[in-house]
Amino acid sequence: MEALINFILQFGDLNKQQIDFLLSKVEMLEFKKNDYLSEAGKVPRYVAFVLEGVFRFCYYNNKSEEVTSYFVDEGNFVVDNEKFESQIVASEYVQAVTDCKVLVFNKKDWDEISDTIVGWEMMKAKMVKKCLTLAMERRSPLVSEDATTRYLSFIEAFPNLINRIPLSYVASYLGITQQSLSRIRRNIR
């Protein structure tokens, strides 16, 4: 719980009563590896803060190939905020890559926090902005670089993930085959 509060307090101030109210709305859930926090074609049920583990955002392209678009690890919120807030169906899956422990807010409680805590909307907007900025910073080098540079950028952006997630997911995220990734890893050792 402390990690969640410390994260939130980066974006504004809350008094003890507001923190207690916030914590009264949170629930701890555990997801086993390969479980889904959210599924394409369904309305996201939770905003989740990752205490332990790694999630990935993924989808199927027009060739029915699974594509990993992003990873979220400890100390970060994992949610498709636009879909959650609007309660519309998600276009991506959010899957546990490892066993995960998360603190979750359902839509009713998340809205109640907004209705009760003065300034929460501004704090929430700042949190969303930080998450989107981080995602863009991590993704943008991958667009124009060669495969080796993309891999090195991945290691820099996600230093704690390379030994925790399947290489097939890393290759998908980088937009290369698993064989290419193996070759790149061999060449940089």
Image (cartoon, rainbow, N blue to C red):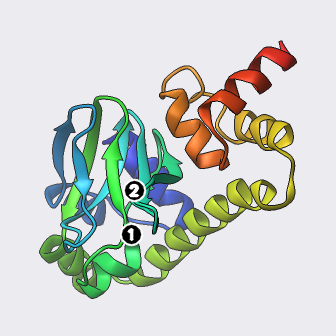
Callout 1 secondary element: loop
Q: Nearer the viewer, residue 127 or 183?
A: 183
Residue 80 shown left or right of residue 154 in the figure: left
The quarter of the picture where residue 135 lies is bottom right
Residue at x 21% of width, y 62% of height = 105
Residue 150 drawn at (x, y percent): 78, 44
> Circle 1 sits on which residue?
80
Q: Is residue 98 above or below residue 55?
A: above
Residue at x 45% of width, y 38% of height = 74
Q: Nearer the viewer, residue 70 or 184?
A: 184
- Disc 1 crowd rating (10 Å Cα; few below 14, some 14-19, many 20+) is many
Tell me which amino acid carries mark 1. Answer: Asp
Residue 145 drawn at (x, y percent): 86, 52
Residue 129 shown left or right of residue 15 in the figure: right
Q: What label does residue 78 carry, if any?
A: 2
Residue 67 drawn at (x, y percent): 49, 54
- Disc 2 crowd rating (10 Å Cα; few below 14, some 14-19, many 20+) is many
Tell me which amino acid carries mark 2. Answer: Val
- State the residue lying farthest toward the top: 189
> How far is disc 1 from disc 2 in space, using C-alphas?
7 Å
Callout 2 secondary element: strand
Residue 62 drawn at (x, y percent): 45, 69
Residue 130 shown left or right of residue 71 in the figure: right
Residue at x 23% of width, y 86% of height = 115
Quarter of the image that includes the C terminus: top right
Residue at x 47% of width, y 50% of height = 76
Quarter of the image that includes the N terminus: top left
Q: What label does residue 181 carry, if any?
A: none
